[in-house]
Image (cartoon, rainbow, N blue to C red):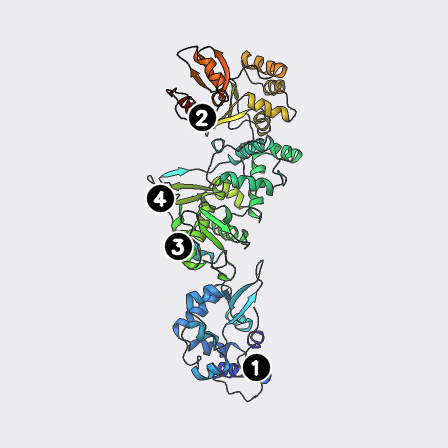
């Protein structure tokens, strides 16, 4: 911390004299520099400080003790929010109002005794404005380290953990699905992922962080191969470690329901570091209340992610109301929401925390450190079932059913030939289709290579129909098409020449199937109905929807 000299050197002679008066010191010096030196000398020593603290009013002593318990410092915004304002006085106004004799807050009491200072200090990644205890006094008092115990939540009530969602390593399989989709330039299907809200965005950001995808969002083939070859425990540890230290993965800006405007910046590491420090102190066998943790943070350390306690410069809107969430009164909707998201989102997705809720709510209410999390928090790869030998079933209609523990390298390769259909905890379904084979061909993949992959994976009972269809596709391409269409049916064949000679009607006709049945061009149904009406023919429409 800055010492007393640096704390007081930007003041004036009048201020030094007021501080000296509070210490019951008679200054003989008449210049600022001499008075400051005389004051510094007079207040040295444990006895002088003990006497000063002995006569401090109780509220001011509480504020002083608060700083001691927080390593002798606290952000200026939070300190003044807790213990009152410090008014600004010029020399003339100070002489008239004597704020040292009529203080309005514990902060002013400490200020006019020289017991605290105010300065921008670079104690983390960027400077913040702090209230602090000058170094001489801090050394004498032997401040307590900042107690994380003050932030520990209470154990959860039984009603808060009725429905349990255990942590697992399914993020590894989901990441394989995403890599395959990106490789084939396909939309990432939410149905194929084990979690949905904000999950795809998180996965994509994490893939970039671990250098598995390039700036154009296309996978890096060699790096993907190496990652998919890792043991599951090592792969999960890689993801957790990368997220833990990443500023690229910005958890705050992934919060659902919020819109982020402007060019302001936050530090994603600060909330993670605090939460992980707390988690390391918790009993893994106990369920802990999320609401209790939020209450502790809001009371004891609300500025955990805010430089200098600034609640006004971040431009965040609530999507539902379009209201700007500025000021400390919106802490629950931004800072509290972030903590809840980190617990039930990334820390759950990465296997660190089990989460639970009550029977009649969808909101997670409690968390517990999982067996995977115990090892990750110790900084070691977790012991997982690294033997991936899940089975693959191929149905006659071209559907592939992959159990969750199919080797990730094989899953990635198969997903490049197929389209995802659905997903559950036990298995994922894909389907071979003309669309998927066409996409694969643009990557230089041939249908018979899929047959070879299935054979190499020792898939039993590959239906002959599937093998035949893949061979025919490679030779002939698409031979059969199924498509929806609209038909124009005529009661009398002699109407057809009339329709063909009417330009507005003829433009709507695609193919004459017979003298009483004509295929209509897609999307022209309503235009055709109006054109028919103009020549005196009222059409009976039997469509689910007229386009």
List the residue tagged with mark 2.
527
Point out the tag, 3 or 4, that comes first from the N-terminus.
4
Residue sitting at x 46%, y 78%: 52
Q: Are marks 4 and 2 in contact (CB under 8 Å)?
A: no
Image height of 124 relative to 489, above or below: below
Q: Are marks 1 and 4 in contact (CB under 8 Å)?
A: no
List the residue tagged with mark 3.
295
The nearer-to-camera label among 1 and 2 is 2
The alpha-carbon separation of the residues under discs 3 and 2 comes to 63 Å
Q: Element type at marker 2?
A: helix
List the residue tagged with mark 4.
160
Q: Are marks 3 and 2 in contact (CB under 8 Å)?
A: no
Q: Element type at marker 3?
A: helix
For label 2, the crowd category at 10 Å Cα-Cα, with few meaning under 14, some 14 to 19 and many 20 or more, is some
Is residue 1 shown left or right of residue 156? Answer: right
Point out residue 486 in the picture as x, y percentages from the top left corner. 45, 20
Say which quadrant the N terminus sits in: bottom right
Q: Which mark is residue 36?
A: 1
Point out the tag, 3 or 2, that comes first from the N-terminus.
3
Q: Which mark is residue 482?
A: none
For label 1, the crowd category at 10 Å Cα-Cα, with few meaning under 14, some 14 to 19 and many 20 or more, is many
Point out the tag, 3 or 1, that comes first from the N-terminus.
1
The alpha-carbon separation of the residues under discs 3 and 1 comes to 44 Å
Image height of 10 relative to 299, above or below: below
The alpha-carbon separation of the residues under discs 4 and 2 comes to 59 Å
Point out residue 379 in the picture as x, y percentages from the top left corner. 56, 45
Is residue 464 shown left or right of residue 363? Answer: right
């Amino acid at each position: 911390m800055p010492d007393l000299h640096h704390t007081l050197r930007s003041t004036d002679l009048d201020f030094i004299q007021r501080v000296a008066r509070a210490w019951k010191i008679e200054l003989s010096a008449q210049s600022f520099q001499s008075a400051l030196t005389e004051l510094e000398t007079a207040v040295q020593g444990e006895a002088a400080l003990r006497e000063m603290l002995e006569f401090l009013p109780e509220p001011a002593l509480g504020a002083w003790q608060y700083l001691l318990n927080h390593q002798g410092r606290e952000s200026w915004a939070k300190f003044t929010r807790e213990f009152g304002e410090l008014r600004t006085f010029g020399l003339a106004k100070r002489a008239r109002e004597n704020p040292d004799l009529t203080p309005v807050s514990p902060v002013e009491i400490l200020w006019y005794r020289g017991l605290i200072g105010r300065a921008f200090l670079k104690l983390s990644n960027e400077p913040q404005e702090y209230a602090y205890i000058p170094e001489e006094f801090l050394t004498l008092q032997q401040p307590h380290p900042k107690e994380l115990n003050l932030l520990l939540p209470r154990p959860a009530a039984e009603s808060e953990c009725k429905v349990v969602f255990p942590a697992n390593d399914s993020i590894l399989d989901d990441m394989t699905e995403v890599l395959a989709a990106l490789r084939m330039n396909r939309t990432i299907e939410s149905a194929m992922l084990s979690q949905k809200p904000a999950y795809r965005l998180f996965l994509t950001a994490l893939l970039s962080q671990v250098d598995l995808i390039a700036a154009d969002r296309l996978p890096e083939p060699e790096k993907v191969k190496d990652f998919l070859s890792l043991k599951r425990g090592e792969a999960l540890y890689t993801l957790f470690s990368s997220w833990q230290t990443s500023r690229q993965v910005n958890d705050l800006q992934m919060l659902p329901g919020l819109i982020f405007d402007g060019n302001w910046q936050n530090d994603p590491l600060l909330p993670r570091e605090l939460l992980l420090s707390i988690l390391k102190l918790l009993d893994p066998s106990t369920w802990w209340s999320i609401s209790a943790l939020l209450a502790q943070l809001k009371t004891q350390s609300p500025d955990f992610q805010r430089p200098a306690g600034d609640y006004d410069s971040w431009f965040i809107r609530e999507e539902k109301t379009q209201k700007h969430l500025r000021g400390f009164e919106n802490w629950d909707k931004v800072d509290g929401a972030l903590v809840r998201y980190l617990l039930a989102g990334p820390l759950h997705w990465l296997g660190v925390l089990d989460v639970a809720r009550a029977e009649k709510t969808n909101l997670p209410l409690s968390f517990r450190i999982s067996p995977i999390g115990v090892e990750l928090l110790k900084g070691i790869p977790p012991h997982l079932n690294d033997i991936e030998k899940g089975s693959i079933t191929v149905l006659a209609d071209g559907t592939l059913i992959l159990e969750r523990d199919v080797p990730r390298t094989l899953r990635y390769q198969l997903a490049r030939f197929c389209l995802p259909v659905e997903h559950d905890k036990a298995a994922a379904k894909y389907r071979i289709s003309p669309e998927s084979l066409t996409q694969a061909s643009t990557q230089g993949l041939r249908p018979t290579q899929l047959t070879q992959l299935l054979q190499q994976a020792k898939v039993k009972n590959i239906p002959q129909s599937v093998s035949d269809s893949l061979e025919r596709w490679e030779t002939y391409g698409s031979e059969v098409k199924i498509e929806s269409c609209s038909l124009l049916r005529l009661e009398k064949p002699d109407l057809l020449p009339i329709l063909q000679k009417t330009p507005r009607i003829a433009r709507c006709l695609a193919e004459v199937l017979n003298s009483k049945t004509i295929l209509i061009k897609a999307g022209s149904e309503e235009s055709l109905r109006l054109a028919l009406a103009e020549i005196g023919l009222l059409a009976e429409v039997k469509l689910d929807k007229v386009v």
